[in-house]
Amino acid sequence: MEKWFDQVKNKLWGWLEHFLSDLPEIIFAALIFAAFLLLAKFLRQFSYRIIFRLSQKKSISTLFSTIFFVTLVSIGLFVGLEILHLEKTISSLLAGAGIIGLALGFAFQDLTANFISGVFIIFKKPFETGEVVKTNDFTGVVEEIQLRSTILRTFQGLHITLPNKDIFQKPLINYSQSKERRVDLVLTLAAKENISHLKEKITVSLAQLSQSAGGKTAEVFFTDHSGDSVKLEVRYWINNSAPENFLLMRDKMIGLVHDAFDTTAQKTPDEPQA
């Protein structure tokens, strides 16, 4: 028992001597780590303000400022370990971090893709909150842009959560960025009818509309002939400042075209009886 106690005593005394001999390096390493820690805290606040000015998003600003903080603290930790001559510990930490990062990358590759796409969307700004967009066969107003997903509110009042990866990789139409938009109506007429007379009536009926965006009036064109039918296309440019302008103008145009058909039918003389 006494022999075992002496061994423990000698071991502890050896550790104490080693600690006292390395005390200056330990104090210096602790000071270096503390300096990096203070610098990291200052740069986290500074980078948050800078990134928030660029992105106007608290989530993205918090994320990148935290990344800067963790990076600087890690550098301070590695420098402190280097001062204490613990190179093997640094190698082990880096190897372990690499393996963990690789495993997490495979396990959460969809989450990572959505996150990276969200960062690009926030900084590239293909759309903003409140704008009307169409993507992935959904059309609506952008309610919120998050790091992982974007929330759309459709014109039916439904809230759709779309992964940012799907938005970033597929075509997107931003209606709000277009100051003018054209309303198209495609009509199919029977070839046996007096199509020139119908075209004239439609043109006269559409003249009730005010001048379209850019000072143009409504345009009426024949676009196809298939023998039994003729296709007529009506085009009208509108101010796209409000999302509902398109539907309101399309509704009005359909009503005027219908009135033109109805007037033409009423003025057509009855066929003589045999």
Image: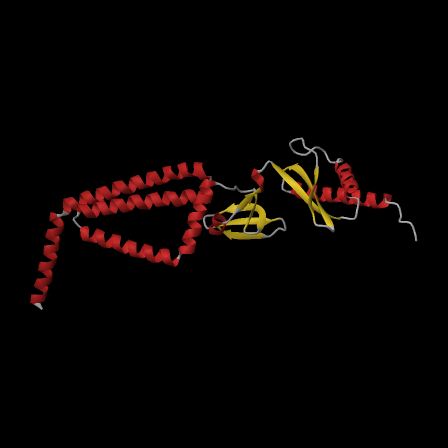
Q: Looking at the image, can residue 194 be seen?
A: yes
Seen at 43% across and 50% down, the residue is 115
Where residue 178 sits in the image (x, y, percent)? Answer: 58, 38
Query: Residue extending furthest bottom?
Result: 1
Question: Residue 155's x, y, as percent?
Answer: 62, 48
Q: Is residue 57 visible?
A: no
Image-quadrant location for residue 37 = top left
Residue 56 against residue 7 in the figure, above or below: above
x, y (%) of residue 160? Answer: 55, 52
Q: What residue is at 63 percent from the left and 42 percent from the top? A: 243
As displayed, is residue 173 above or below residue 217? below
Disc tally is 0
- Name the foreground residue: 32 vs 88: 88
User: What residue do we see at 10% from left, 64% from top?
Assistant: 5
The quadrant holding residue 201 is top right
Q: Is residue 111 left or right of residue 4?
A: right
User: Is residue 182 found left or right of 273 in the rendered image?
Assistant: left
- Position of residue 73 measured from the top left corner of the image (x, y, whole percent): 29, 45
